[in-house]
Structures are given as structure tokens and as C-alpha cells.
Amino acid sequence: MLLIRLAAVSYALPIGHVVEVIRPRQLTPIPGTPPIALGLINVRGMVCTVLDLALLLRERPLGDEAGAARDDSASIARGVLPASVVLLEHRGRAVGVAVDVVLGVHPVDDDGTAPEQDGSVAHDGCVQVGEQRIPLLDPEALLAHAMLSSEDGR
């Protein structure tokens, strides 16, 4: 699992979905897109969309059309470089999610994942890391709606 932090909350991502972690770089804004789309980055000739993970997880209202300043460290304003971008594989292409901190890779045994549902489509249970239970994100479910909306022009 790749462990990340967004604001004060840690999350785990299955390493099989992670293409790579990249340092911040200039984002090219995408005019007319919702605030969830922070912009585009070029990764060795591959153009990737970077999404605001906080908005994907709905930790902040989606109605912030101006991409207001990071008043609660949960959302990244357009034009502000994220601390890190995690590139995830989604339907054959890489899509970036902006995160505050990449904590590292943590091995998890098959029995390390607790099948605990919290009603959120983005969560697929939890993993135990030391004494802490960390929400496990399902990248496919997390990105599906955002990417379909942008591809359909919604």
C-alpha cells in the first residue's frame, strides 16, 4: 500500500494502481473545467490530468468554483503547486491526484485489510498500520465519476 496524507487524514492506495509519485511541477490550467480538475502536467511526454483528491473525497464542498485558497489544507487552489502528485492507472491511462504528503510504501498481508464499509464509494475498507486503521481508497471507484464527467463534457 502507498500511504498518503491529505490535511490531517492518512489514506492507503493499493500499490498496483500507482504508476508513480512525482514532485510538484507547473500545472497548466484547463479553462471551463470544474474545480476538481487542478490542471494538466507533462510527464515525459505524457499529458496527465491532475485532480484535487480532497474534492474527490468530498472533504470540501464542490461548489468552490474559484478554487479558493487552501484555508483548511484540505483542498488545493488552482495555480498552487501540490506537495506531491500520485499518478494512478485508470482505464489504461495515468491520472494524477494531488496529495499533501506521501508517507511511503507499507506492506500489508492478505489479512491486513479489514472489509469495513463506511458507505463511501471511495473507500474499500481499512488497513492496519501499527496501531492505526487507515482508510483504503479504491482508485477505480474514486476516479470513475470524475473522469466520466470530464470526458462527457459535464
Image (cartoon, rainbow, N blue to C red):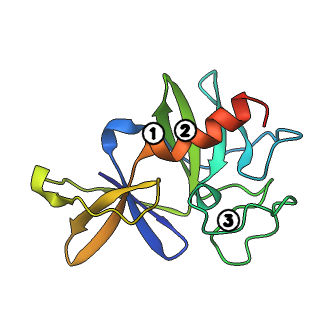
- Amino acid type at image mark 2: Ala
Tell me the element at label 3. loop
- Distance, label 3 to label 2, CA atoms, is 20 Å
For label 1, count other residues whose C-alpha is less than 10 Å away and answer few (under 14), some (14-19) or many (20+): some
Q: Is residue 85 above or below residue 45?
A: below
* Picture coordinates of residue 120, whole percent (x, y): 46, 60
Quadrant of the image for the C terminus? top right
The residue sitting at 72% across, 35% down in the picture is 150
- Distance, label 1 to label 2, CA atoms, is 6 Å
Q: Is residue 87 above or below residue 73?
A: above
The picture quadrant where one finds residue 50 is top right
Cβ–Cβ under 8 Å for marks 1 and 2: yes
The residue sitting at 79% across, 48% down in the picture is 34
Q: In this view of the protein, which residue sits in the foreground, 115 or 30? A: 115
* Picture coordinates of residue 24, whole percent (x, y): 62, 49
Which disc number belongs to residue 144?
A: 2
List the residue tagged with mark 3. 75
Mark earlier in primary sequence (3, 2):
3
Which disc number belongs to residue 140?
A: 1
- Amino acid type at image mark 1: Glu
The residue sitting at 71% across, 51% down in the picture is 36
